[in-house]
Amino acid sequence: MRAKILVMLLVVMLGAGATAPASELSLAVVDSLALPGDRVAGLTWAGVDTLAMLVTEVDSMALTDSLEVFLVVGDTTGTVYWQEDFTGVLSRGLAWDGEFFWSTGDDTEGGSLLYKIAADTVAVEEVYSTPGHRPMDLAFDGRWLWLTDRDNGRIDRIDPETGKLTRSVGAPGFSPTGLAWDGRAMWLAEAGTGRLTRMQGGRLQRRAPVAADDWFLRGQDALMAHDGQSLWILVDGQRFAIAYRRDGRD
């Protein structure tokens, strides 16, 4: 009788989607890249060898410490293909969907705006209100645009065709910052926990944390981008990005 009860409990647990705790992932440093400007507030790969960045610089001609913001596109050798002044418009995060750049900026009422920017003309095509008021980073998964909402501890999924919120997913911990799509899964950095997590599924429900020995950075923001092979992480305030690769495959 007792054995039957145990079997029944096991069946109920499996039916409810109970899963074993995810094993930790291992990462290894494989490269680094020096970045321009006083601070990089967003970065994304726009092709195999093309890197786009949201670069902020102190305006040396201004009487106050005002910042200039530029969308810069170039290669890994430091060659700049083009740059455009977005001062007073863009503030944080950058993503590339194959045709358009996406970034965010603050509005006058304490909220935040999502900008869709054509790469060929550098013109703002659309402007949408974001669900939160402090998005930190963006990633495009081939269909949806994802934004981290640091203050609300969630990841919002946006339809790039309409700008509408289609789903919100709670972060594994709190204070999510960096976000990157590797072609199969989403990577998330959190300032509150200091951890880095790889998430899969439509609701990002399958989660595998990176071993703390390989990545642990509490209390600091981080931006991320994936070039198809490596995960690039930029810690706020640093002038270089570090590339990591996983040890092993799914």
Image: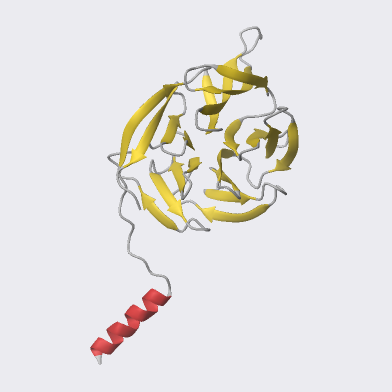
Foreground pick, 2 / 141: 141
- Residue 117 in sight: yes
Q: Residue at x 69, y 37 (%)?
A: 116
The residue drawn where x is 34% and y is 49% is 249
Judge left or right: residue 218 versus residue 160: left
Q: Can you give x and y, in whole percent of width and height, for residue 191 in the image?
A: 44, 39
Residue 59 drawn above or below residue 208: above
In the figure, 15 relative to 197: above or below? Answer: below
In percent of the image, x 41 and y 36: which residue is there?
230
* Quadrant of the rendered image containing residue 28: top left
Which of 80/203 is in front?
A: 80
Give residue 32's quadrant in the image: top left
152 up-or-down from 15: above or below: above
Compared across the picture, whether 14 is left or right of 117 comes to left
Residue 111 shows in the view: no
Above or below 61: residue 160: below
Name the one closer to the observer, 177 or 229: 229
